[in-house]
């Protein structure tokens, strides 16, 4: 499902402020697996996740995601591939605070020219799954941190992705909410979805549903 | 020089377009020089992003260039009111030596712009950027044409003199007169009608055949025949369609038919004709692009079929619009012959 071969991402190449964010990383995550990219801050976890998530392109190497080589795709086609196959939960949630829960969750479907009825049906289904049905018309800024987290997950799942990526999803959550989140992700994994989480939280990488752990340091995977 | 709001707006338009093109051409030069599809460096990524910007500017610029033919015509109509001797846009065009060349070049440029837009459209569907460099190289061929187009328009308006008496369209398209207009007007209408009404069904049959069966040579022939039919149609409009619209066998002006007193039928005729011709060009051009390899094959097959269908629809509309004044005349005159 995800195959990364000697992928690197270098910023400001050849300049004094050159940063090798990802350095010749090779990894493989099969369909239905849950993998955790573990490492300290600045180790390159988020950069690797953006490469897998079709948000940025590698400087060298190859990346295959959901049956397509994405490492040399034009940005427009990367966006289309992401829209169809990938859901992303961001560290800061990246929700639009002044929109309602329903609008935030349905947002990724608007470019797909889907009918309002179909969008509404999908949103209903996911909000019920995330126990957010009663918050449907609430503005996101009126929700608690845990609820916002669940809205972010619902939004990531709205396009029915084969791959779910989560960047430090527990960074703003207490222990109870972290456990709740991991249970939610475990339930999502049961639907044969591939999940990759970037995290340095032991409650995440020690979770029994995790199949693989990639240890990152200075942009490299030092241990699997 | 005559200054009125239309002329000033044309000048502003020319200046604006020239500035946009200059900027887009600067980026295009960088792309032609440094583009390396195999590179994964940041520089290539920046070029790709710039190419989106420049191609968008160029695409809309060229689109406006096509539409500007209408603006040019409307400016000529407003000029006809102040130029002595001019009864319509044709007279205004005849007011100096730059008028007709400006119009003809504008039409030619419109077609070249349309070709570029087709190449760009195919390129945007390719995941391997196969046509990007080629498309920007083409732009450098297009640039001198655009420059000439701007220059001729500029010179035309600059040299308009309200003290010079021009000819009206009746003289320009006089059957027994001299010059290009008269030569076309003096073509035998019956022969032109026959050519016109035989050509369109032939093209439609070709289109029907190609929309059901693939044929590389057929696609080239369809586009070539589409271009020939465009020329035949323009000649046909001057030779017999316009006289039927005016219900006067001696009046052949192809521009007066766009006026209100003729229910703006000219706008419909030309719009259908240009759209039909544009989509007729697509199959042949796409076939040529296929030879460049890459993923083009997968993209253009569907495009060829669609464009043939669209061109058929617009040729039929053009055919019907051309036929309408003839039928109406026949009904009104109870079977009379306009040219007898």
Image (spheres, rainbow, N blue to C red):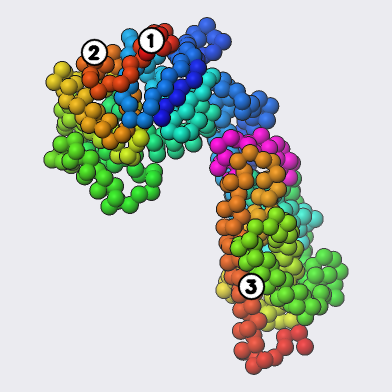
* Distance between mark 3 and mark 1 Cα atoms: 73 Å
Q: Does the magenta stretch include residue B280?
A: no
Question: Of the numbered discs in the image, which one, if any, rests on residue A61?
Answer: none
Q: Closer to us: mark 1 or mark 2?
A: 1
Please state the horizontal and vertical placement of residue B299, each as a whole percent of the image. 58, 46
Q: Is mark 2 on a helix, strand or loop?
A: helix
**To which quarter of the image does residue B197 belong?**
bottom right
Q: Are marks 2 and 3 on the same chain?
A: no
Q: Does the magenta stretch include residue B130?
A: yes
Residue A127 vertical position relative to residue B149 in the rendered view, above or below: above
Q: Which range is magenta?
A: B121-147
Front residue of B300 and B319:
B300
The residue tagged 1 is A223
**What residue is rendered at 58% in x and 24% in y?**
B44
The residue tagged 2 is A202
Q: Do labels 1 and 2 share a chain?
A: yes
Front residue of A59 and A35:
A35
* Distance between mark 1 and mark 2 Cα atoms: 16 Å
Front residue of B72 and A216:
A216
Please state the horizontal and vertical placement of residue B286, each as a whole percent of the image. 66, 50
Q: What element carries label 3?
A: helix
**To which quarter of the image does residue A195 belong?**
top left
Residue B229 vertical position relative to residue B124 in the rendered view, above or below: below
* Distance between mark 2 and mark 3 Cα atoms: 75 Å
**To which quarter of the image does residue A206 belong?**
top left
**What residue is rendered at 16% in x and 37% in y?**
A132
Question: Of the numbered discs in the image, which one, if any, rests on residue B319?
Answer: 3
Please state the horizontal and vertical placement of residue B156, each as a whole percent of the image. 73, 52
- Image mark 2: chain: A
Tell me, yes or no, if residue B169 can be seen here. no
């Amino acid at each position: 499902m995800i195959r990364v071969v000697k992928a690197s991402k270098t910023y400001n190449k050849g300049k004094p402020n050159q940063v090798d964010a990802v350095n010749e990383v090779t990894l493989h995550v099969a369909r239905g697996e849950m993998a955790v990219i573990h490492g300290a801050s600045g180790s390159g976890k988020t950069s690797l996740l953006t490469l897998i998530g079709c948000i940025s392109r590698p400087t060298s190497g190859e990346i295959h995601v959901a049956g397509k080589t994405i490492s040399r795709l034009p940005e427009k086609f990367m966006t289309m591939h992401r829209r169809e196959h990938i859901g992303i939960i961001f560290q800061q949630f990246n929700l639009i605070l002044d929109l309602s829960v329903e609008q935030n969750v349905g947002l990724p479907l608007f470019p797909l020219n889907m009918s309002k009825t179909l969008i509404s049906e999908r949103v209903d289904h996911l909000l019920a799954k995330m126990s957010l049905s009663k918050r449907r018309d609430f503005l996101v800024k009126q929700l608690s941190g845990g609820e916002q987290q669940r809205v972010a997950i619902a939004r990531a799942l709205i396009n029915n992705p084969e791959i779910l990526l989560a960047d430090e999803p527990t960074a703003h959550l207490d222990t109870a909410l972290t456990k709740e989140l991991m249970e939610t992700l475990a339930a999502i994994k049961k639907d044969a979805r591939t999940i990759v989480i970037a995290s340095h939280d032991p409650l995440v990488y020690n979770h029994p549903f995790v199949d693989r752990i990639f240890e990152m340091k200075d942009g490299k995977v030092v241990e699997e | 020089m005559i200054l009125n709001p239309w002329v000033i707006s044309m000048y502003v338009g020319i200046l604006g377009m020239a500035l946009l093109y200059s900027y887009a051409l600067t980026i295009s030069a960088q792309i032609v020089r440094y583009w390396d599809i195999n590179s994964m460096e940041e520089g290539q990524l920046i070029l790709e992003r710039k190419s989106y910007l420049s191609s968008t500017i160029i695409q809309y610029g060229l689109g406006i260039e096509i539409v500007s033919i209408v603006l040019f015509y409307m400016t000529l109509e407003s000029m006809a009111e102040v130029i002595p001797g001019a009864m319509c846009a044709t007279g205004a065009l005849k007011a100096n030596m730059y008028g007709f060349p400006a119009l003809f070049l504008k039409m030619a440029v419109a077609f070249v712009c349309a070709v570029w837009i087709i190449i760009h459209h195919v390129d945007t569907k390719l995941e391997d950027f196969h046509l990007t460099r080629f498309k920007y190289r083409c732009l450098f061929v297009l640039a001198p044409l655009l420059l000439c187009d701007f220059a001729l328009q500029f010179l035309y308006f600059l040299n308009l003199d309200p003290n010079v008496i021009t000819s009206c369209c009746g003289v320009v398209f006089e059957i027994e007169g001299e010059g290009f207009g008269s030569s076309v007007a003096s073509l035998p209408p019956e022969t032109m009608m026959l050519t016109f009404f035989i050509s369109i069904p032939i093209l439609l049959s070709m289109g029907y055949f190609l929309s059901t069966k693939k044929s590389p040579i057929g696609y080239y022939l369809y586009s070539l025949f589409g271009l020939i039919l465009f020329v035949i149609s323009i000649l046909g409009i001057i030779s017999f369609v316009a006289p039927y619209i005016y219900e006067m066998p001696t009046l052949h002006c192809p521009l007066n038919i766009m006026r209100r007193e003729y229910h703006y039928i000219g706008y419909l005729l030309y719009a259908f004709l240009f759209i039909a011709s544009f989509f007729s060009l697509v199959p042949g051009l796409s076939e040529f692009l296929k030879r460049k390899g890459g993923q083009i094959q997968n993209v253009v097959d569907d495009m060829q079929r669609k464009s043939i269908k669209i061109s058929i629809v617009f040729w039929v509309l053009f055919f019907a619009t051309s036929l309408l004044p003839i039928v109406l005349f026949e009904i009104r005159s109870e079977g009379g012959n306009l040219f007898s």
